[in-house]
Amino acid sequence: MFDFEASEDIKEDLTKFTKKPALTSTVKKCVVEAVGTFFLCSTIALIHSKPEEPLLAPLAIGLSLAVMIFAFGHISGGHFNPAVTLAVFIRGGIDYLSALSYAVSQLVGAFLGAAIQKEIYRAATGPSALTVYPHSATDAPFVTALICEAMFTFALAIVVLNVATTKAQEKNSFFGLAIGMTVTVGAIAVGGISGGAFNPAVGIALPAVHGITEDLPLYVLGPCIGAGAAALFFRMTVDEKELKKE
């Protein structure tokens, strides 16, 4: 009596209605940049290494960056750092709108990580407890700390550009460790002088959630200077045929 079989048009409409909307490529990239930066900042915020194990904190930071790069590098490039994004932009590997979107996403992830871990740490240890945040040595001149931040951000950015944005190193299996261990080396070498941020998102968010802002110019200028210099050096030294879009 009644024909309950749906027509092909109705079936097609139902399929469109029930199908989960896919995230756009740009949104996916921004989301993973925020997530990766979140975990990097969370690791730094909660590290309270034992005095007898001075290498524990830099190693944990480098490894957290490495695993996030291995997890998300194939989606967004695994920057998790506005300075790295700046270097890739100057190098020509990303357009300016994407670079701006990355930087905003990284800052959002960094502030979320810093704020959440601050509350977790205070709940566990007491309301006056502070999570870890980068800060320059009290007796270190600003210019000295600035040079340290610029110098090792240069190292970080030049490693990223060479291992992750050239045709010769395409699809290599070591890029995450190379980048993460560069941060470890920098933190060990100059962490006691400049704080070893090498990352504006980290250098802004972690101190800011505690209301500490005196080193913010250091952690913006130093990494940006280092990243810009690295991108220019990369363009001067790499063969044009090795350049590839990210």
Image (spheres, grey):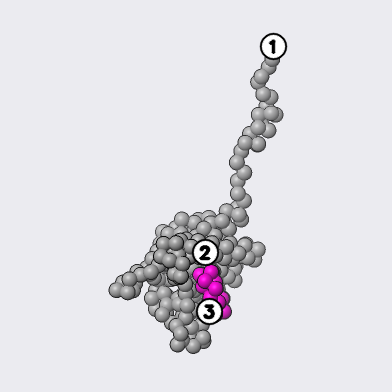
Q: Nearer the viewer, mark 1 or mark 3?
A: 3
Q: Are marks 2 and 3 in contact (CB under 8 Å)?
A: no
**Quarter containing the C terminus:** bottom right
- Residue 50: x %, y % from top left: 33, 71
Residue farthest top in this picture: 1
Residue at x-position 41% and y-position 62%: 124
- Residue 169: x %, y % from top left: 46, 63
Is residue 76 rendered to the left or right of residue 60? right
Give the class, few, some or many, for how many residues have Cα within 10 Å of label 1's Cα (few <14, many ≥20): few
Badge 2 or badge 3: first in the primary sequence: 2
Q: Are marks 2 and 1 in contact (CB under 8 Å)?
A: no
Q: Which residue is mark 2?
A: 115
Badge 2 or badge 1: first in the primary sequence: 1
Is residue 38 rendered to the left or right of residue 191? right
Secondary structure beneath dot 3 equals loop
Span colored in magenta: 204-221
For badge 1, the amino acid type reads Met
What secondary structure predominates along the stretch shown in magenta?
Answer: helix
Residue at x-position 38% and y-position 66%: 60
Is residue 61 rendered to the left or right of residue 116? left
Relative to 115, residue 195 above or below: below
Q: Which residue is mark 1?
A: 1
Residue 238 seen from this side: no
Comparing 41 with 17, the one in front is: 41
In the image, which disc is placed on residue 215?
3
**Quarter containing the N terminus:** top right
Kindly indicate the quadrant of the structure image that contains residue 104: bottom right
Residue 213 is one of the magenta-drawn residues: yes
